[in-house]
Image (cartoon, coloured by chain):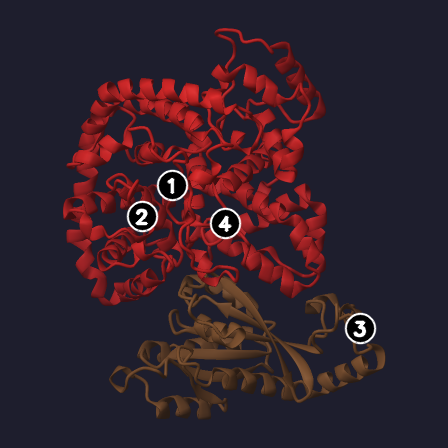
Amino acid sequence: MSAPGLNNDSKKNKRTFWKRNTEKVPGSIKPVYGAKHPPTEAVIQASLANTDQSKNRNKRPDSFADFDHSTSDAWDDAEDDLMLMGTRKLSIEETIESNNDELHNIANENSTNFQGAKSKNIDVPMSSSHHKAFQPPSSPVPSPNVGSMGGPGVGIRQTAVIEAPKPVTAIRIPNIPVPDRELSKLHKFGQILSGPITDLDELRKLSWSGIPKPVRPSAWKILLGYLPTNIDRRTLTLERKRSEYFSFIDQYFDTRHETIHRDTYRQIHIDIPRTNPLMPLFHQPKVHQIFERILYIWSIRHPASGYVQGMNDLVTPFFVVFLSEYVDDSGENLDIYDVNKLSDDILKCIEADSFWCMTKLLDGIQDNYTFAQPGIQLKVNALRELVQRIDGPLHSHLEKHNVEYLQFSFRWMNNLIMREIPLKCTIRLWDTYMSEGDGFANFHLYVCASLLVHWSDKIRRNRDFHSILLFLQNLPTKDWDNEQIGVLVAEAYRWKFMFADAPNHLNLIKK
Amino acid sequence: MAKQYDIIIRLLMVGDSGVGKTCMLCRFADDDISSTHVSTIGIDFKIKTLTIDGKKIRIQIWDTAGQERYETITKQYYRRAQGIVLVYDMKNEESFKNIQKWMKYISDFAPEDVELILVANKSDAYNSERKVSKEHGEMFAKEHRIPFYETSAYMDMNINEAFIMLARIVMKRHKKEIDKQMEHIRLFCREDSDAHIIEKQGKDNNGCCVLM
């Protein structure tokens, strides 16, 4: 990694460097958040915010936030789960003013180039849905409103209760100038995605801190390598891949009752009704059938692992995100969306896209699911090593009470912590995973460490095996939002940055 | 922290995927099955504290995922089980046949003195749905000299009875250690003392007065 280390010297230099450049210099170096351009300072701020947000708001006048404030042009490149955490202050007036400008710009832009690009790259009738996608979000917090009932794991989370979706709007408007940043970010995504060739590095940098909902379907497809970066090839690729998927179904789906495939099919068949049971979206006959086909076809095309319980969960973020492409959800709650409102052609597109993107995801973590699940065993060991280094007291506490990492983190690895956080948080987390080179395999480990260390105090307050393990199996995350995920990935980035290249560290993973 | 229990016993649940292991456990430990329709990944854990014959027993139950792929992980938990609940679904003949397979794993990986019970779950099924007769289940259990129960986690039938029966036979099997343990508690721990006083006994046993 080319980024500087986090030892005291380089940190100091970096600070000095920032200070020397407190005035806006046109054409000066533009720091950007992203996998390869670590938001070092911001990450540190974020971790501070994590431990004490209120302290952060009153921080020293020469802090990063002020630098940031004075160079807002440079930092516009990135958004900002990190910034949402209170490292940046903007007055309401500023917000409104810049909002108006943005609205104006976006309206102009959209009516021309992006709208055209979009209609070019999707080959199903979309009339209103895409049109809506590039109108300025009417909700001031355009974060996805899916999954507010919680992830698949909530079924066994003690604190979980079925609740009406939280009102995600109104309350926060006055304090957090989200529309400004979201609009500006949306605008940048629009430019990147609609250019003749999408710059993958740029897209990753921009996506790392969260992708705005309207562009997420396209961004995910490109980040995963399902769609080509060349805009002219997208329509053809989509057509080809979608018809390829449906030819698999014609070819293989009837084999599900054959003796050798019966067990696989039965397992899928009994797991689908148990997928995210609290979200009615996933419990409609048509959706069950879609999931069955996706999982069955994937399984028989990947005999080394076949279907493993938990893969059903992994389809849900794709399904929801690709569904959002066709649903005007300003008036719709996707949690309870009735898919019968969509045409079969559209459902087919969602199904095929979900299949291919899930395939891409699983390609990177297949050793999690092959015989004896070696990928998971390695990662659980690596997690132990990592936590031992970053939070010795926590590690000792777990050891003292005979809590083994396998007992709680097996599921974290197998289901990519989907059972531990609400679905909307998983979706946000995947923005970052897709922006990291091998996020689902490697970066996930650091996120797990970050998740564990996040609860360090609480875990250490539990003083016997039972209460520690019960706590770890039922993490109180049901009210988590993008904000917490922003903190989590920022912390994870810090650990990765500090340890990934350390010679004696994480040998297990590199083996 | 007041003393919450005198003795811990460790149980394990095994059986094919979808036979209702987790539902049984949630019914027993939380008296609730409404929120449990998710598949178990790898291994899960619950506890229940009961008073049996005047002794406070903490029952520690490991719930395993039934899918074959998880066997590498779940087999690691047999070694320390004192009692195992073998579960099949009376609506699914295959799950009954597979009890043989689970018995084999038990003889390969569990301690010799492990106690077992056989449970046919989903007794709320209509007669037309039933694929394994009560007689078949009973016969199998008799052959292996283990108690047999037909249960319904859904209707809350026989669940407590089955778990308590297993707890009792585990306690009977370990009577000597329990008596010694109770004597130790009587002599050294005041009524309101900390459980951790007796936790010191050994690192190998989850830090409690576990029956070895």
How crowded is the residue under tag 3: few (<14 C-alpha within 10 Å), some, or many (20+)? some
Give the structural element (helix, strand or loop) at label 1: loop
Q: Are marks 2 and 3 on the same chain?
A: no
Give the structural element (helix, strand or loop) at label 2: helix
- Would you name the residue on which mark 2 appears? A334
Locate the C terminus of chain B by quadrant.
Answer: bottom right
- Would you name the residue on which mark 1 appears? A144
Give the structural element (helix, strand or loop) at label 3: loop
Q: What is the spatial separation of the Cα atoms under label 1 and label 4, in whole angstroms? A: 14 Å
Contact? badges 2 and 4 (CB < 8 Å): no
Q: Of residues B15 and B97, which is closer to you in this image?
A: B15
Locate the N terminus of chain B by quadrant.
Answer: bottom right
Residue type at numbered disc 3: Ser
Task: Check the image and report above or below for B120 versus A57.
Answer: below
Residue type at numbered disc 1: Pro
- Would you name the residue on which mark 3 appears? B193
Q: Position of residue A88 (x, y in %)?
A: 55, 25
* Label 2: chain letter: A
Task: Check the image and report above or below for B134 versus B204.
Answer: below
- Would you name the residue on which mark 4 appears? A479
Q: What is the spatial separation of the Cα atoms under label 2 and label 4, in whole angstroms? A: 18 Å
